[in-house]
Image (tube, rainbow, N blue to C red):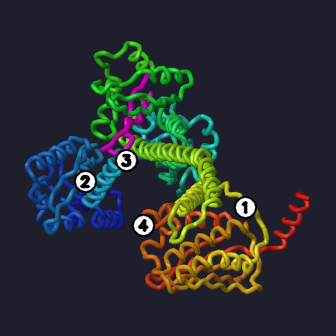
Amino acid sequence: MTGAGEAVSGSRTAAGPMSERLFQSAFEHAAQFMALLSPAGVVLEVNRYALDLAGVERGDVVGVPFARAAWWRALAPEQQARLGEAVGAAAAGESSSDTLDTTAAEGRPATIEFSVRPLRDERGVVAWLIVEGRDVTALMRTEQRLRVSEATFKGMVDIASDAIISIDAGQSIVQYNQGAERIFGWTAAEAVGQPLGVLIPERYREIHTRHVENFGRSEVASRRMGERQEIAGLRRNGEEFPADASISKIDVGGQRLYTVVLRDITSRKRRERLQRFLAEAGARLARSLDVATTLRTIADLAVESFADYCVLLERKQDGSLWRVQTAHGDRVKQGIPEALRSYRIEPDWPHPAQQVLRSGGSVLIRDPAAIFPRAPDQDEEHYRLLESLGVRSAILAPLGAPEETHGVLAFFSTSAQHPYDEEDCAIADELAVRASLALRNARLYETARNAIQARDDVLAVVSHDLGNPLAAIRIGAGLLLRTLAPKEGGTGGWQHVEQIRHSVSQMERLINDLLDVKRIEAGHLSLEWERVSPAGMIADIIDRFEPIAAEKGILLSSAAPPSVASVRADRHRIVQVFSNLIGNAIKFTPAGGRIDLRAEQQGDEVIFAVADTGPGIATEDVAHVFDRFWQAHRRQREGIGLGLAIAHGIIQAHGGRIWVETMPGRGTTFFVALEKASAALDRELTERRAVED
């Protein structure tokens, strides 16, 4: 290093050899680009870093103008001119700096950041120029990646639907994204610098400030906010809304920053509330089967949680729609819906409810002018009442199946900020389905109730107005039989009178069966409880039916040991049950067959069985044997098929069980289980006799 050493030694005569060597060593081994130029810009000396960076030898650059030296490979003319300008400025006594893109060793692209400064002699004249530079290629790439990363992060933060807000240790807003602008209504320019409290309802601000301070002192880096209670945000227009939020903290440059990510959960809460509403609606609609109550419940449910005004429209045969039920959530306006009930919607009116009838699908209307279009012949008072409701959006949903829409359920909202949307339309459809089912069930129940009442009225007529003439006929037939002697061969008047008496008895049994069915269905079958001995009861039944069975060539036997415990029963009604069972067995068992009546004790029950060797019951018919009128329709036998239904009702009234087992072609067995009599029954009977005495 001669140029640099000579220049320095010439200017610093007082400096010793040691100082010169130190200067030369520092220059040579500096960890940056260094070159010494003449005032004309010619390279006098260059250090090892500069040579290694460019991959050249000292002889390639020393003595060459700095701007055209070998280390500036493929340097554009424009950049050479900038180098020349920097050298010229330094020669004139002004320092300058610049950044150039060039090619380093091995053809590697490089970005060099350099400065050119003048060095003056003792007289203050510029004697040399010193160039310092460094390879900032890696740094520039890092900065570029950082800028890209920052831009990407900023873009992600800006487009996020959630609000992302950063605050400093004093809880002032320092960052505020587009999501926050959409949610809170403040622009970033308006929000940055404001205290975080402007975004929080006033009643929560103090406690929220303490929560942030406590979080800052904790060792937790992040946590979800509102774990103990729901949190709320405050929009610029003063509206509060429910929110989910999380908070994190980080120290940047000695400054504590908190970042809150907040989500507006108004829609989610509303969906949850409406789902609870639908579940409650189903339960409340199921509480009554009265049509009027159901209609009122539907309208009341709607205005409680979903609509400001609700109307249920029923379709008439001429296609017109009548308001059969209305409700309004505002007490001041409750009289308007009632006044509207006197007006009907004609089939040819351009009303959206008629569109629902035609299409069978729901209609969502967000244009207030389209909700109540004026009909050509519409009464002016009718239209004035509609306008006074202040409706801003509406949903009209069909009642009934699409192919048989019998009405329309209409929901109306007066909110301008939150008009109905497609999600609300789905809720309305769900409620309409539930309402349709409830109405259908209520009307079916009403129809069934009317039918039962009509049947009961007929039974009352039959039992009273028909029973008296039948009794007179039976008595008259009995008197005639006493005066007429039977003729040989069963002919003559006596036989006809006997047939009349038999027919009258059969008709009276049918009337009694019908009355028993009515009592059983109404739960009014009265029972006289007593202690009944199975053995004694079975013996009486065998005595009564043995002659009838013998006449048909059927063996009737019993097995009821005296040791079988007594049962708690109404003896008359239980005998009626077994009379029906044995009567059926005799009816269907062929000559030469057998019928057994048995009783045995099993725990706290006594099990009775009536088994026959008849043809049995078809497997598919077993489930119907206790149905009313089944025998009349399926087996075409004498009677109207009420015997087994009555037997089933009587046993159920006793708290017992009755069932059947059959093998087609081999016979049928009916089982009856009754509760064993207890000491409590004995005390009850004793008390009853004491009262009677």
The answer to whether residue 89 is left or right of residue 587 is left
Residue 457 at x, y = what percent? 56, 44
Q: Quick check: marks 1 and 3 in contact, CB under 8 Å? A: no
Q: Is residue 513 left or right of residue 181?
A: right
- Three-letter amino acid code at the position of disc 3: Ala
Sequence order check, earlier mark of 4 and 1: 1
For residue 124: magenta?
Answer: no
State the separation of the CA atoms marked 2 and 4. 108 Å
Q: Position of residue 223 (x, y in %)?
A: 54, 56
Q: Residue at x 51, y 39 (%)?
A: 291
The magenta-colored residue range is 389-414
Q: Which residue is mark 3?
A: 160
Residue at the location (60% across, 38% down)? 205
Dot 2: few (<14), some (14–19), or many (≥20) neighbours within 10 Å? some
Single out the mark in the foreground, 3 or 4.
4
Report which residue position mark 4 lands on.
Answer: 634
Assign a secondary structure to mark 1. Answer: loop
- Residue 297: x and y, percent? 53, 38
Q: Which residue is mark 1?
A: 527
Quadrant for the C terminus, please: bottom right
Of labels 2 and 1, the one closer to you: 1
Q: Which label sits in the foreground, 2 or 3?
A: 3
Q: Which element type, helix, strand or loop, lies under badge 3?
A: loop
Residue 113's disc is: 2
- Which circle's residue, 2 or 1, is located before the other in the chain? 2
Looking at marks 2 and 4 on the same chain, the residue that comes earlier in the sequence is marked by 2
